[in-house]
Amino acid sequence: MLIDPVSSPRSRAMLLGATAVIAIALGGCSQNRMQTGSLTDADTPAQAQAAAGQEQNAQIVERWAAAYKRDPKNPELAVGYGQALAAIGNPGRAMAIYEASLKHNPRHTELLSAYGRGLAREKPGPQAIAALQRAKSAGAKEWTTYSALGASFDAVGRHEDAQKAYQEALTLKPDEPSVLSNMGLSQALAGNISTAEETLKRASRLPGAEPTVRQNLALVYGMQGKFKEAEAELAKDLGVAQARENVRYMRQMMSQGNNWDAIRRAS
């Protein structure tokens, strides 16, 4: 659920540096439908819940917009509004809000972090690295900032720097599966395949590890030609048939010889 700027008296102090998450249930995509007729938004509980969630999120974004409009130089409001926009699928507008606010608050840590993470999501590379390093110099303490910095370094082939950034993220949040997963991919790209495999195995065993962690482990198996192991890992989340199809696609990617592109497309 998006965080509402007026949900509590402490909301501005507590929440503006955090990532806003939308909890919208998805429904109807895999249901069998009749070839004639149509379903209304309220025909299934999942669809009704999704519609209600979308309406509530829109209202929350409107409240952030109103608060930001009243005080556009306030960096905390800029961060909250930008994160709300990004969470509903409008990252371009979010980046514009961050950039406008940075003109007035060039050293605000949370604002720099949000801007750098946004750049890293949209186009990891030199610009994202510069913004995230500015956030680091300003004293950023969010593990997500360092994880995004690592991903940006990896995108330009600076794998040693990437792994240092991931280690800083792990210092702030030990045993975070997503950071360990990124670390493993970085190690693989640097040519340390066996180390990468061990890192990703460790990540996959941790509570809270998402399917993407296991997919990355499968990818590293594939980079070594261990396609049987890759298929077994993918089958844990995808089932046997889809895992087999993904391994076929993986073989095709690996044959092209561009491992970074393979990782970007498969993860």
Image (spheres, rainbow, N blue to C red):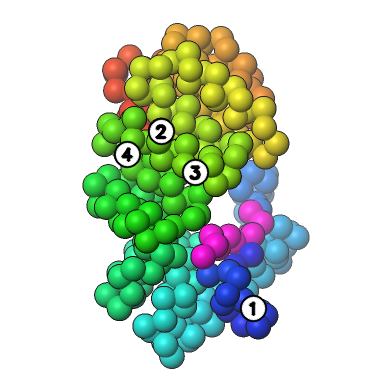
Q: Is residue 230 visible?
A: yes
Residue 163 x %, y %: 41, 33
For label 3, the residue is 169
Q: Is residue 242 left or right of residue 195?
A: right
For label 4, the residue is 153
Mark number displayed over residue 258? none
Mark 4 against mark 2, which lies toward the viewer? 2
Which is more N-terminal, label 3 or label 4? 4
**Marks 2 and 1, how far apart in space?**
36 Å
Q: Is residue 201 left or right of residue 32?
A: left
Circle 1: residue type: Arg
Q: Is residue 92 left or right of residue 214?
A: left
For label 2, the residue is 163
Q: Which residues are magenta?
A: 17-26
Mark 4 neighbour class, 10 Å CA radius: few under 14, some 14 to 19, many 20 or more: many
Quadrant holding the N terminus: bottom right
Is label 2 in a helix, a strand or a loop?
A: helix
Mark 2 neighbour class, 10 Å CA radius: few under 14, some 14 to 19, many 20 or more: many
Is label 1 in a helix, a strand or a loop?
A: loop
Residue 21 belongs to the span the image colors magenta: yes
Circle 3: residue type: Ala
Is label 4 in a helix, a strand or a loop?
A: helix
**Residue farthest to the bottom, as pictured:** 70
**Marks 4 and 2, how far apart in space?**
9 Å
